[in-house]
Amino acid sequence: MLDQALQYAHAHRDEFLQELVQFLQIPSISAQPDHQPDMQRAAAWLASHMQQIGLRNVQVFPTAGHPVIYGNWLEAPGQPTVLVYGHYDVQPPDPLDEWRSDPFQPEVRGDDLFGRGTADDKGQLFVHLKTVEAYLRTGGKLPANVKFIIEGEEEVGSLHLPAFMESHRDLLQADVAVISDSHMIAPNQPSIVYGLRGLVYMEVEVQGPAHDLHSGSYGGAIKNPIEALCEIIDALKDNQGHITIPGFYDKVRPLDPEERAELARVPFNETQFRAEAGIEKTWGEAGYTVKEQISARPTLEVNGIWGGYTGAGAKTVLPAHACAKISMRLVPDQTSDEITELFRQHIERLAPNTVRVAVRKLHSGEAAIVDRHIPEMQAAAIAYERTFGRRPVFTREGGSIPVVADFQRLLGIPTILMGFGLPDDNLHAPNEKFHLPNFYKGVDTAIWFLREL
Ligand code: BES
Ligand code: ZN
């Protein structure tokens, strides 16, 4: 059964690639309202593809946002049930002129497939669909039961997914979840991610005078809202990189020496990290390694800041308001509700009484840590080893996939993060790519995983 499935997967690589290209050509950008019809098209394409490969009960569930797609195959009595999650939405392709080829006309260059959504997450999601196809087209059955839940709002905060999950618990009930939406360390060094950070995304607006003022007639006697905002932002971290929000670290689970030692053994090349980022020197929280800073410690980032006159030439003006988008990445056991409140209180405390400040939350999701000693992790480790010839290392990542915590909370199941991307895949950036050997090896690994389970 396994051998035929692997053979089928190897013989059909060209077809797999052509189908993936069709899926990638649909610009399913969840953030942009004018791509609403493309979201519907991507959902319909996926549902019909899932039916074609032999999944049963395929349904497109409308939500208050973008639809959720479901499908299953449950004819392996006595075997475990795997819930596969993926997302069919993609990030906007901007800045467009930095792409070497059209983001929605995928192009193979060397061993890589370039295009928006190749790695995040259409290509990685496809790995699991092709796994099902390889088994069903050969032996007619799978070694385990599978359920698929594929959403269209991951890149915008999965706003409607928890409610959908709550009202469809029975439909989704499984023994373990699997997600391929992260990366491995290098093409020859597989890894399994067991920790992801949570996220709280806030907007801070500082209102000064009722309208823009002549900076000559008023400047000198009025608090400039841009300056007030800069002072607030400056006060959020000290010069050691610690976040100064009172209580921010209270619930942070300390890294025990064993975990620190294990993380230190994860091959992580700081020179390459700096080169990829295009910086000469790193900067972060004192007392932690770079690997820890970007995965196991909480952070605060200013994502954008605006206000006043930013057009061509000079304009003398004392602006009426200033805004910033500020996000915090969280680690267990911080909760997004508590951090949202602490942030709000701290900003209000920092604001001088010469301006008015409004604090809004845009979205949030919880951090997750999965026990790396459970048998399902071991099944995944063996599957990687069979395919890549090397045992995967266990690592934590700084990105967020809020559904992992929701699977734990609402369904009581752990998630295995079987990522097949690479660190330089350019997620959310121009020239996103998926390393094709990883696509094909991903299918082999997922074929092995269902068997090992
Ligand atoms: N695929 C990423 C998450 C990811 C990135 C995991 C890097 C591991 C390493 C996912 O699509 C993503 O970008 N998520 C958002 C979530 C947010 C909008 C709630 C993120 O991390 O910013
Ligand atoms: Zn993603």
Image (spheres, grey):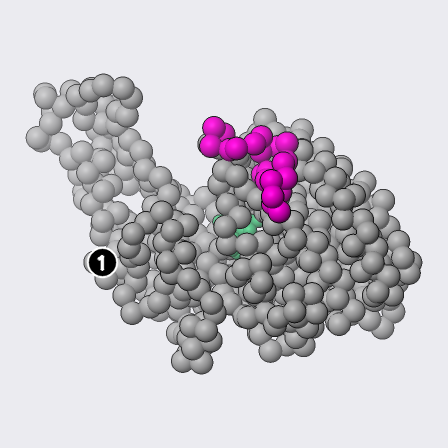
| Stretch in magenta | 96-117
Label 1: element kind: loop
User: Can residue 429 be seen at all in this image of the molecule?
Assistant: yes
Front-most of residues 392 and 246: 392
At a point 57% along the width and 74% down the height, the residue shown is 371
Quarter of the rendering containing residue 355: top left
Residue 439's x, y, as percent? Answer: 67, 52
Q: Residue at x 28, y 31 (%)?
A: 307
Choose top left, top right, bottom left or bottom right for residue 34: top right
Mark 1: few, some, or many residues within 10 Å (few <14, many ≥20)?
Answer: few
User: Per the image, is 84 magenta?
Assistant: no
Quadrant in which the N terminus is drawn: bottom right
Name of the residue lying farthest toward the front: 110
Residue 59 seen in the current view: no
Residue 94 lies left or right of residue 80; in this view the side is: left
Q: Which residue lies most toward the bottom here? A: 258
Magenta segment includes 111: yes
Examine the rendered structure and indicate whether residue 79 appears above or below residue 12. Answer: below
Quarter of the image containing the C terminus? bottom right
**Residue at 28% of width from left, 41% of height from top?**
357
Asked if ligand 1 lies within 8 A of label 1, the reply is: no
The residue where tag 1 is placed is 238
- Quadrant of the rendered structure where residue 342 is? bottom left
Name the residue: 82% across, 71% down.
Answer: 79
Q: Position of residue 421 (x, y in %)?
A: 58, 54
Which amino acid type corresponds to the residue marked 1 in the rendered image? Answer: Asp
Q: Position of residue 201 (x, y in %)?
A: 43, 48
Which residue is nearer to you in this view: 306 or 241? 241
Q: How many marks?
A: 1
- Measuring from the top left, give residue 422's x and y in whole percent: 55, 54
Residue 22 position (above or below residue 349): above
Q: Is residue 282 above or below residue 432?
A: below
